Amino acid sequence: MRVDGLEEASVAPWASVLNESERARAARFVFPRNRVEYVAAHVLARRALAAATGYPAAEFHFEAGVHGKPVARIGDTAAGTHFNLSHSRGMVAVAVAPFEHGLDVEPLDRSINLSIAGRYFCPEEIAWLSGLPQARQGEGFLRLWTLKEAFIKATGLGLTQELDGFWFQVFPPAIRFKDIADDPAAWRFEQRDLDGKFMAAVGFRAPPGPAPLVTWWQVEPDALSATGDPSAPISRRPVNSVVGPMS
Ligand SMILES: CC(C)(COP(=O)(O)OP(=O)(O)OC[C@H]1O[C@@H](n2cnc3c(N)ncnc32)[C@H](O)[C@@H]1OP(=O)(O)O)[C@@H](O)C(=O)NCCC(=O)NCCS
């Protein structure tokens, strides 16, 4: 959901669905833009969880795992649906699924200093990035970044996950493990260009059985404002912007 251009006054009514600790956390951000992003992401997460489980959006509470990954609960029990959210300048994104996954979204106009690539990326990734025409290296950087974030958010380890233990083949997106005892074939990653302005990636270890179908939707902020019922279904339209190869 795009949140650029949204004023605090327009998201304020949504906050009624948040709990005390979410409202307090939102209030601690210094910049209005961060408050808007936080409220929008958390309301969208609650609405998506409500749609997936049938529980009212306001009834969820959240518990952080050891490395901070939140788990949605209803009363004393897990809500039975996993979620992950990402907020970036101008866009918030939420994924829900019956299994663990990770999601990241970044603005494509984010200023990138390619000299820091060595701090985050493996030699294989840096070699691929260096082989791109200069004009496409910023996008290449963000393709890698969002895929890597999707993985470390899927495992829930966040930055405690060694970034040099795995690397990505960018197209089609596929993980390769170095020092991590895991099966790359078990992992699925998808990437989308959102409005030509944001790069998003989602990743998960596929559960046994038929491959899950990932469906991407764009939600308009109006959809959250249109009704006084915070548990009403959210109107949305499909996103079809699969990203292609890069050269
Ligand atoms: C915290 C981290 C999990 C994501 O941070 P981020 O990219 O700055 O932020 P995002 O908006 O995408 O995600 C934040 C949300 O992820 C969730 N989250 C927090 N810890 C998490 C974890 N360990 N695993 C999965 N999700 C987590 C939370 O819902 C959080 O939002 P909230 O605090 O409003 O509830 C972690 O990956 C990080 O600090 N990254 C910093 C950037 C970096 O150096 N990345 C290297 C990539 S190569």
Image: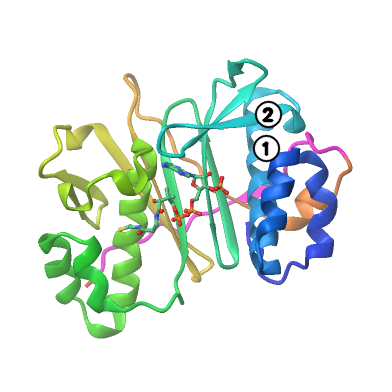
Q: Residue at x 40, y 38 (%)?
A: 67
Residue 136 visible in the shown view: yes
Q: Residue furthest right?
A: 228
Q: Main secondary structure of the magenta part?
A: loop
Amino acid type assigned to the residue bearing label 1 in the image? Arg
Query: Is 128 part of what is drawn in magenta?
Result: no
Region rendered in magenta:
229-246
Q: How far apart are the alpha carbons under marks 1 and 2? A: 7 Å
11 shown above or below 140: above
Q: Secondary structure beneath disc 1?
A: helix
| Residue under label 2 | 60
Please tell me in which quadrant of the rendered image residue 230 appears.
top right
> Few, some or many C-alpha atoms within 10 Å of disc 2 (few <14, some 14-19, many ≥20)?
many
Q: Quadrant of residue 90?
A: bottom right
In this rendering, is residue 45 above or below 3?
above
Packing grade of label 1 (10 A; few <14, some 14-19, many >=20) is many
Name the residue: 23% across, 70% down. Answer: 117
Q: Residue furthest top?
A: 76
Say which amino acid is labelled 2.
Phe
Residue 198: x and y in percent read 48, 66
Could you tell me if residue 220 is visible in this image?
no
Asked if the residue under mark 2 is in contact with the one under mark 1, i.e. CB atoms within 8 Å, the reply is yes
Residue under the point 20% across and 76% down: 132
Q: x, y (%) of residue 29?
A: 65, 61
Q: Does mark 2 have its CB less than 8 Å from ligand 1?
A: no
Give me the disc on residue 46: 1
